[in-house]
Amino acid sequence: MIRDEIVALVERALDAAQAAGDLPQFASPPVTTEHPARPEHGDFSANLPLRIQGLARMKAIEVAEALRRHVPAHPAVDRVTVAPPGFLNLYLSPSWVAAQTSAMIAAGDDYAALTMGAGKSVQIEYVSANPTGPIHVGNGRGAAIGSTLAAVMAAAGYRVQQEYYINDAGTQVAIFGRTLYARYQQLFGREVEIPENGYPGAYVAEIAEALKAEHGDRFLRPEGEEGDPDLGRLGLERMVDAIRRDLAGIGVEYDRWFSERSLMDEGGPYGTVMGLLRDQGYIAERDGATWFTSSDLGESKDNVLIRTDGQPTYYATDIAYHYDKFITRGFDRVIDIWGADHQGHVSRVKAAVAAVGGNPEALDVLLFQLVTLKRGALVVPLSKRAGEIVTLKDVVEEVGADATRFFFLAIGANQTMEFDLDLAKKQSDENPVYYVQYGHARISSILAKAREEGLSSDAADTSLLTHPAEQALLRELLLLPEVIEKVVVELAPHHLPHYAQALASAFHGFYTQCRVIQADQPDLTKARLLLLEATRVVLARTLRLMGISAPTSM
RNA sequence: GCGCCGAUAGCUCAGUGGAUAGAGCAUUAGUCUUCGGAACUAAGGGUCGGGGGUUCGAAUCCCUCUCGGCGCACCA
């Protein structure tokens, strides 16, 4: 990308200035650039002179001047200036900038593909909500973040695998099964209450009805007896199917759905991990339970792995799961995306990963702060155990998948979100996603009209694209690779929607000021059509990375 | 009590140690209305929660205080 070339130019200028004796010899910190807020300060600005003035024992402005004299010529760079108190400002050549459009169009949906991932495998696991109830609004945030990060990392050259970890074992699943059986019995006229800690939501009763319709009384046991485990298993399958459908509704598709239960298979990861921990002396038996002595590894306390009832804890299975990710499947990187309420789990999973032979540095846990759901001033509980559940599906049906995704993506993960259901519809009308999509539709419409009139961008002379609005748009198009890099480095997808808005704004400004199709100016028309094609490519690419549609009409 | 996250315009939020802190919405005033008005231009609106410190330079880094969210289970 162009930024890397600019950085290289400044590095070479430093070397040359030192070689020529204009600057003393010293080891320099790495060169960085930024985009100045004000256009008169150039397209790229390097603050290197300010940072090395001490090392050079010179005034920053003099360092800058010495560097400026040694910046090598480059076709992309028009001029280099020095600005107080010691900035080196570089200006891109308007004709070079305009000429980049052809490459963007040629690259198409591969535009801004990076090699930083170097083909490394990365597994991204997200949502993984208990399959004891439907996906709710809070889960949707993780879904939007995870699926977007996956797309962006793929664009950055990683081999990405997206996974959903199905918690199909453990206490909550058992409670779900008992709730389902209670609902099932009720359908046969038995006066049975759902369990105290059960799931009161209507969806459990609906599953019971569906299973009754399909299987009749097959699962009925004599009164007072426990239910047939097959009923629970089938109910869980239906729940997982519903989750899969709801997530597909906002464009989320996983490569793999991983069963927690499968970890317990004979010779599987769970047994392996327990053996590994035991061999290394990290296991202690206390109070009838089996403990991981994680405090030996710097954790604040030990944790139970096997409860007194003989069942493994969520932590134990999670260790096995991460062993499977790192050791069995050998991912180079693993990214877990969790709600902030799991924050306390982060360090002990990392400790466990290290204990079973994985590299904790290769594990990133991306926490997103919780979504509080409101209906006007009232806070709506998100718990599955509360009666009312505001499902992701409900919200998507009301405000649309594109607006929902954009809404979740636009806010940084560290920021708590308030989702006001009363305002959801109104907000969706004002959602900036439509502003972005409208830009794409507008371009498509103009290009269609041009085709009708037999106009094309063939052999366009891009050097005609000198209008400030054209140049502003062109510079925006060049930024996407930097945005992708930033999203990957920071694991922060929220940069993407902000970029999309800036790009759309640059386009709408161009559209207002520069008429594209002009009969009396065939050459300019060709050049502007080329610019439109490039803009459409970049806009569509940006929207697609966010999992949002790029409509040709709206 | 300990830990993680946050506090920036009326509201929702961006902001990489840089130059005059930005956007959307809202408000006000305009443009234009033959390529799509879901558009464009402009104005008003800020002690970047308070206080110290580091630095040529701090919304950004460090310390501290206040307020808010979330954790600190043999639930997940």
Image (spheres, helix red, strand yellow):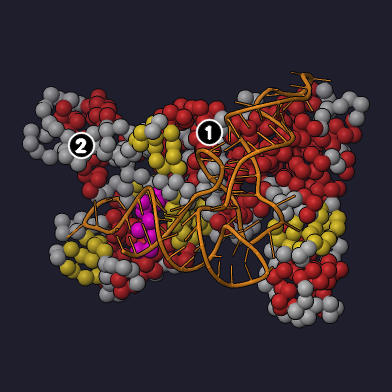
Q: Classify the position of the N terminus of chain A by image quarter.
A: bottom right
Q: In the displayed structure, does residue A390 sit left or right of residue A119?
A: left
Q: Secondary structure at mark 1?
A: helix
**Number of on-image labels:** 2
A207 drawn magenta: no
Q: Nearer the viewer, mark 2 or mark 1?
A: 1
Q: Nearer the viewer, residue A442 or A499?
A: A499
Q: CA distance from mark 2 to mark 1?
A: 35 Å
Q: In the displayed structure, does residue A420 sit left or right of residue A203?
A: right
According to the picture, the residue beneath numbered tag 2 turns out to be A179
Q: Give percent across and percent down for residue A413.
A: 48, 49
Q: Give percent across and percent down for residue A346.
A: 38, 60
Who's the residue at 50% across and 35% down the image?
A404
**Marking on residue A403:** 1
Q: Give percent across and percent down for residue A244.
A: 40, 38
Please report the bounds of the magenta region as a residue range: A338-348
